[in-house]
Image (tube, rainbow, N blue to C red):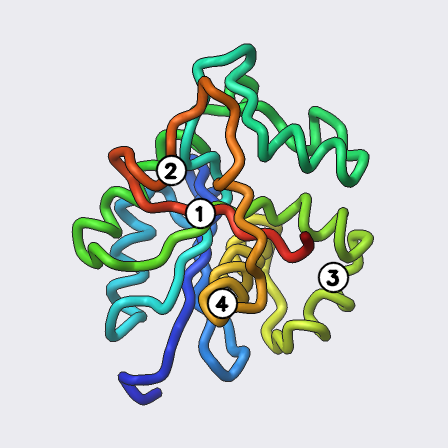
Amino acid sequence: MADDEPVWVGADPGGKLNFGVAILRHTGVVESKCLDSADEAIAYVLKNVARCPAGVGVDAPLWWSSGISGDRHADQWLRRRYGLSGGEVQAANSLRGAALTQGAMFVHRLRSIYPSVPITETHPKAILKAIFNDDWLVFTSKFQIDTPPVNEHCRDALIGAVAARESSQGRWTHDLALTRLPSEQDPLSYWLAPVHYYWPEP
């Protein structure tokens, strides 16, 4: 692999052996692994990526709301637009702590190494259900992925890497982070900023 070839990283934050991380090469080849923490995920990226990733997709809420249930406009829009349930697109207050803390810390740690790396929030399960009718083969065919994931966490990390690639190359342009409720943080001007939330459809 040449050092100047772009790579994209996806992360599915979780706890012990549930932190999925995926590295997507420009050829469609994917390397993925389930780890224990954001620290281990960062170490995996540094070991396998020669330079700053061209983009990173993280399956976790990367900005928050002080409103009821911590619900955000982006979450409400996805439920309304695609008929997804509250269990499928959860408000932040109902999520397990690992997704929130390890997701934020992964971004924080990565930004300390690569300050300018483009980062998008992503929701792999919602993308797969809403856009691809839960058909993994259709997804991999459309995005030319040739490496099957070993489990659901690696799959979701891989979808995050695809979201990072598609947005960084200008194919996904609908940024759900741009429309927010008054009680939400501004993901362009807070401690993890800037982060986006690129979605494949308008």
Q: Report the Cα–Cα distance between label 3 and label 2.
A: 30 Å
Q: Report the Cα–Cα distance between label 4 and label 3.
A: 18 Å
Q: In this view, which residue lies farthest toward the bottom?
A: 2
Q: Nearer the viewer, residue 183 or 55?
A: 183
Q: Helix, strand or loop at disc 4?
A: helix
Of the 4 image quadrants, the one containing the N terminus is: bottom left
Tell me if mark 3 has few (under 14), some (14-19) or many (20+) residues whose alpha carbon lies within 10 angstroms of its own: some
Above or below, 107 against 93 in this view is below
Q: Residue at x 56, y 19 (%)?
A: 94
Query: Comparing marks 4 and 1, which lies closer to the viewer?
Result: 1
Instruction: For the residues labelled 2 and 1, say whether their Cβ atoms are less than 8 Å apart.
Output: yes
Q: Residue at x 39, y 48 (%)?
A: 35
Q: Which residue is mark 2?
A: 187
Closer to the chain start, of discs 4 and 1, is 4
**Residue 98: where, in percent of width, then height?**
42, 30
Q: Which residue is mark 1?
A: 196
Q: Report the Cα–Cα distance between label 1 and label 3.
A: 25 Å
Q: Which residue is mark 3?
A: 136
Closer to the chain start, of discs 2 and 1, is 2
Q: Which residue is mark 4?
A: 165
